[in-house]
Amino acid sequence: AEFGKGVTMSSPGGAFSLTMRGRLQFRGSVQETANEDEPVDLSFQIRRARLVFLGELFRPDLQFYIQLGFSPTDMEPDLLVPLRDAALSWTAFRDFGVRIGQMKVPFNRERVISSSALQLTDRSIVNGELTLDRDVGVQVYSNDLFGLGGVLAYQAGVFGGDGRNRINEDMGLLYVARMQVQPFGFFDDGYSEADLVRSPVPRISFGAGVAFNHQARRQKSTHGTFYEHSTYDEAHAEADLIVKWWGFSLQSEVLLRQAVSPTQVLFVDGEPSAELPRSGSGFMVQGGYLFPIGLEIAARFAMIEPLIVEFLRRSESALGHERELAGAMGWYIMDHNLKVQGEVARLFDEDWMNAKHVGRVQVQVFF
């Protein structure tokens, strides 16, 4: 047993192992809008309460990972089931591993980075809208394609397309592919924000992903509200970058979601009505500097725009204009395992004055 690594039990000879870890995020927040008639919102919550089980099944190349979430925000509002991850991985070959079960869809870096390893208290508005959330399926992958020292990595998979804890009710599936390039080779914290290592050697990782969700039934493809009567074929694309060097960190992503099937017009009480897709694009850039004493300052800008592609007969999108400008400070007492974070953010649309201000303080314990 060790703080930050959990409790591990193993069989004689180490053929079977089980590690248990727990994580809590305690958050206090305040929120106000430009409308003076609306009251200031103060709240305290357990933002995340997670329990993780992982280990090996009788051989080192057969691993399992199970994660449960017990906070209300860990579950979907219409399906209060705590199961977040339940996956089995087989890694016998360097260039070809297989993972089956419920897992994060390998699409954009910001989503795949654990919520335990963030610089700010939560991910950007771009990720909240345009990411692909957890789903059930199978993927193949390699973190060291061709044995080049981690210069190349890939993931490709097929998923149900309706998100986590869902039973696929149609023939539509989600197809995903992603590639990463690390010019200076593999580094352990490519999927962790903040440069906690403070290495004098620069680490850089480029990533790009594409996906196609056939007959998507949810407004955000694999998450969000379900359409009442419609389904859309949706194309997704993204590109991302992360750079770390001597305490400095830079992360950026651009994401795209476009419905490629015509808008479906329904008739309600004899009147035409359309459930518009949420086609849009988004961009985020985030950076920070970690001082040697474990204190970090960070900032982020993110924006979302509706996307209209005329040749695809796309003239309307249900998506609006959104902006996020945030600054944060973090104190890493024991890396990400024990940290305190504070954040202030301004959320606005095309009008700078039509804004909402949010302040958060969060403590994370990951034992």
Image (spheres, rainbow, N blue to C red):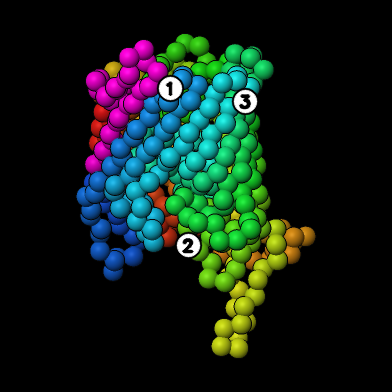
Q: Nearer the viewer, residue 63 or 318?
A: 63
- Image quadrant occupied by the C terminus: top left
Would you say the residues marked 2 and 3 are in contact, meaning their CB atoms lie under 8 Å apart? no
Viewer-nearest of discs 3 and 1: 1
**How far apart are labels 2 and 3 at the CA level?**
35 Å
Q: Which mark is residue 112?
A: none
Which quadrant holds residue 146?
A: top right
> Mark 1 falls on what kind of element?
loop
Residue located 30% across and 30% down the image:
20
Q: Amino acid at mark 3?
A: Phe
Pointer 3 residue: 96
Q: Amino acid at mark 2?
A: Thr
**How far apart are labels 3 and 1 at the CA level?**
20 Å
First-in-chain label (1 vs 2): 1
First-in-chain label (3 vs 1): 1
- Where residue 86 sits in the image (x, y, percent)? 43, 40
Q: Is residue 120 visible?
A: no
Pointer 1 residue: 58
> Mark 3 falls on what kind of element?
strand
- Where residue 18 sits in the image (x, y, percent)? 34, 26
Packing grade of label 2 (10 A; few <14, some 14-19, many >=20) is: few
The range drawn in magenta is 1-26
Residue 362, compared with residue 220, is above or below; it is above
Pointer 2 residue: 225
